[in-house]
Image (spheres, rainbow, N blue to C red):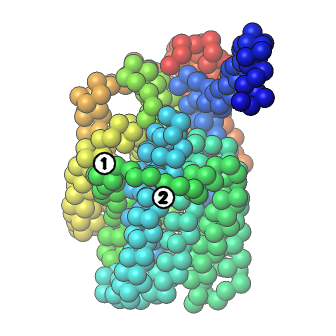
Amino acid sequence: MTEEDKDKQKNPNSNKEKEETENSENQTNNDNKNKEEKKPGKKQSLGKETMKNSGYNLTNTIVSKAGGLILTIILARLLLPELYGLYNLVLSITLIASAIINAGVQKTTIRYVSEQLGSGNREKARSYFRYLLKIRGVLFGILVLILALSAKYLANSVFEKPAIFLPILAGCFLVLMRAFKGVINSIFISIRDFRTITINSVIHQSLRILLPLIAILVLSDEITLIGVFIALGIAGLISGIFLYFSLGKNKDIIKGKVKEVDKKRIKEYLFYITLTAISLKFFGQVDTLMLGRAVSAEFLGFYRAALNLVLAVSTLFAFGNVLLPVFTRITKERLERGFQKTFRYITMITVPATIGIIVVAKYFIIAIYGKAYITATLPLYALALIIFIMPISALYSSLFQAKEKPKLLTRFTLYSLLLNIVLNFVFIKYFPIWFNKGPEFAILGAGIATLISRGFYLFILAKKSKKTFTLKPISSGFFKFLFSALVMAGFLIFFKNLVDMNLVLGIIEILLGIGIYFTTLYLIKGLNKEDISLVRDIVKGKLKSIKETKRI
């Protein structure tokens, strides 16, 4: 018999008290542990979480789009329309390649890793991440090989522009760096760490502006485009390394043991979401590709100058990346309220932005790109409505992805892509003939074709979401937004006819226009107390007003 057993026989009450003390201490430790575990995962209302992340996302998108716009301006002004057109043609090819490698896999990674992290299963999250990483690697190897081997054929035979052969090869390096950064970025989106993403965006955009600028200034005209694409790739590499070292303890999502995942479920979702992503990327680039063969590089440069301006503005209001992980975790009742509020805020901003761009289109083009790009005003009139369409389409798209309805998205995207191809073919070819004009009407035709097809895509998304999720946006505020925007437009027209416009006066005009829009909206009671409190708290960097409103 051991000494411990003898003590138990001699003093049973003492041992009982000892056991109770130990159990009490264990319970206290477990309670403390549970508190610590619950701390980072503390439940928030959808409104608070979404607006907090939307604040970071808004900052991120402002930084990225401001950086993209600055880069666009620098490239457009230094390369001039012809080289700028060639640059955009090569960029469209590399973006499609990147979409095949990244877009579908990244959205699938965010979808399933976010789901597992939300349920506290980090090992399962790691397993999904690693499995999808292997798929991404295989796709990259196959696609870059195909792109490199077909570069000469694309340059000489498809687009009949031999000057883009070597830039396409340099674009392969950019595709690699986009894939690398996309892998790490998907983790931060899944854990909803938009703060780090925003910091990284500042670094990336700074490098995206600085490195290509150095390449243009240092290299000769013959190899300028090659240098630009290599510089963009290096910017992606450096920012990707920064993201990796910012993971900290979240590196366990990359490293560690894995277990079996539901491959059939993933593959089915991945197939349709990838097909959708590729279709969407073609959807966004098909006009550039078709114009690349139909018109000279100079007119392609005019068209892309207008389109890039519209895309820079519209993506400021696309909250898809924020809402995808949130929509994944919420139920129908909260989903409906969250969707309606988000829809309201998007339309509140995009309606005046769209009308404002149309009114000051000519001055925008001259101020941003210079008088050499005045022809870009024509397609801008048609493309401006995309500022309203794209953010709402992104909202609906995030909803379908989060609720595992990728088949529907794929079908709708393919329908819209087919319509876009047909309309682009007809309008690019026949608009100059019908109106007895030159290639400037070919780029106008491309703009109208893009607008119609994107409007069609939004229409079928909205119609199907109403049937599938019984969701419909609150439309009562739309007409007040429209009325206020028209009042603003009247002021803008009066102001530009009153003074000789320049850059300084243009900025003043825009700021006054924004003030008139919101003042009119307030006077006709288009703003409620929640809207005013939200704006005030966002300015202060707080979100206290969310607590005073209904929890979403």
Label 1: how many residues lie within 10 Å, few (<14), some (14-19) or many (20+)? few
Where disc 1 sits, the SS reads helix
- Give the residue displayed 50% in from the left and 62% down from the top: 305
Distance in Å between CA atoms under marks 1 and 2: 16 Å
Q: Quadrant of residue 267?
A: bottom left
Q: Pinpoint residue 194: horizontal percent, then vertical percent.
A: 62, 43
Label 2: how many residues lie within 10 Å, few (<14), some (14-19) or many (20+)? some
- Give the residue displayed 63% in from the left and 54% down from the top: 251
Taking depth in this image into account, of 289 and 403 the one nearest to the observer is: 403
Q: Which three-letter amino acid code belongs to the residue tagged 2?
A: Arg
- Give the residue displayed 54% in from the left and 13% down from the top: 550
Q: Pinpoint residue 266: horizontal percent, then vertical percent.
A: 34, 51
Left or right: 66 in relation to 440 = right
Residue where numbered disc 1 is placed: 265
Question: In this picture, is 115 found above or below 213?
Answer: above
Q: Quadrant of the N terminus?
A: top right
Taking depth in this image into account, of 205 and 84 the one nearest to the observer is: 205
Q: Pinpoint residue 45: horizontal percent, then vertical percent.
A: 56, 22
Residue where numbered disc 2 is placed: 130
Where disc 2 sits, the SS reads helix
Taking depth in this image into account, of 447 and 457 the one nearest to the observer is: 457
Q: Is residue 22 visible?
A: yes
Q: Pinpoint residue 84: horizontal percent, then vertical percent.
A: 52, 73
Question: In this picture, is 528 found above or below 336?
Answer: above
